[in-house]
Image (cartoon, helix red, strand yellow):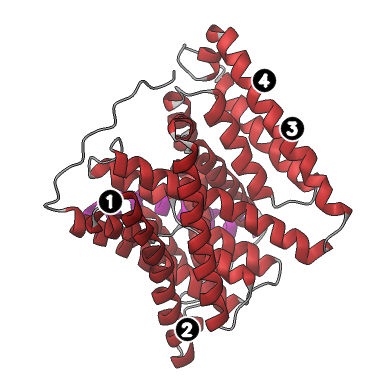
Amino acid sequence: MIGQNAYALLMVSVAVLLLPGVSILLRIPAVVLEIIFGVVLGKSVLQFTFAGDWLPFLADLGFLLLMFQAGMEIDFVALQRQSKGQLLFHVALFAATLALSFGAALLLNRGMFMALVLSTTSLGLVMPTLKEAGLSKTELGQSILIAATLADFLTLFGITFYILYIQQGFGWEFAKPLALFVGFGILLRLGRLWAWWNPDQAALLLGLREDAQEIGVRFSIALLFLFVGLSELVHLEPVLGAFLGGSVLSYVFREKGVLETKLSAMGFGFLIPVFFIHVGMQFDLGNILGADALIFTAKLLGFALVVKLVPAVLLLLMGRPFRQVLQTGFLLSARLSLIIAAAAIGVENELISGAARDAIVFLALITCFLGPTLFKLVTIGAPKPPKKVGKEES
């Protein structure tokens, strides 16, 4: 038993080490290779079974850390720069996406949960794609980032409360999470004030000063588990707690680059790849190879593009050119981490079948290629919009 676990740990560790280099050579996201490696290792091909709970434990920890870092990616400075009209427009954009997603779910003979799944996007793909294109600081780039942030944030809230409704119905249980959200709001304000009045201690937490004890990393992990624990107490999804914990860090500490790098080293260096490998191991290729399954997956892909492209047409009302409509729609159609997380939550709560989960994971693999690729094709040759001029809040 010990020998089997040792070999399993060795295989996973070597894969985590080598796959990023292979992904650079093949010019595809490392996450895709990690999932494919898990597919080969798991029930679809080699059918390896690892003894013990160590792999699911590491995968769950990686999952929580992934959502924590997703919360850290929220740019509150950019959000605060938006006028009420601009924020309302982006909320309307998401509402249109959700309405179309609900219609798509009905056409697929699925329920509200599938509509929420189709509403997701991938902030983790949107941000690097915009940076690579040199558009992250432009008005177009900021608009897409805000739209992606709201989609991630609101979809995660929607999934959490929908599951709470399925489990508990409307009742006093719905009041429990209010304490968490009130505490979240208070912590945001108090934390921001503390950072303002204690810049030296804040610099220590952010890793801007030499610290052999890595207090900032310890504080971040403690904050992660604090919100995960509180979420469990009020019967919310732990991933929402992880997301909120990351959001607190993002709001309180604006110059968080060094701390984010340290957390990324721990997360994307090992734990998060283990999560994606585990997702691949749970993937059953047989679930998407049948004629009916392929038709369902094709429909799912078509709807996944439509629910993002059609609402983007609203940008024409803001005086944006049609090219920017396509850029926005294509890039927001890219899905990866959150949709895979949603699929895992859906299976855990018996809202979707294992076959539907595998179709959603396959959809994520396709759109994480298709969205950024189509965005780049439309962007090539386009004049670069001027960068936004404005003083950033420190």
Q: Residue furthest left?
A: 381
- Between tags 1 and 2, which lies in front? 1
- Tag 4 near tag 2, CB within 8 Å: no
Between 204 and 246, the residue placed more toward the observer is: 246
Residue 62 location (% of width, % of height): 56, 47
Q: Which residue is mark 4?
A: 190
Q: Which residue is mark 1?
A: 320
The secondary element bearing badge 2 is classed as: helix
Tell me the quarter of the image containing the C terminus.
top left
> With 182 as the anchor, is 346 left or right in this view?
left
CA separation in Å, label 1 and label 3: 39 Å
Q: Quadrant of the N terminus?
A: bottom right
Name the residue rendered at 28%, 37% in the picture.
138
Precedes in sequence: disc 4 or disc 2: 4
In front here: 48 or 118?
A: 118
Side of 139 relative to 223 (left or right): left
Which residue bears the numbered disc 2?
Answer: 296
Give the camera-side residue of 296 and 26.
296
CA–CA distance in space, label 3 to label 2: 42 Å
Asked which secondary structure carries label 4, the reply is helix
Q: Earlier in the sequence, mark 3 or mark 2?
A: 3
* Left or right: where 379 falls relative to 102: left
Q: Nearer the viewer, mark 1 or mark 3?
A: 1
**Label drawn at residue 290:** none
Which residues make up the magenta segment? Answer: 1-26
Nearer the observer: mark 3 or 2; the answer is: 3
Question: Which comes sooner in the sequence, label 1 or label 3?
Answer: 3
User: Which kind of residue does numbered mark 1 sit on?
Assistant: Arg
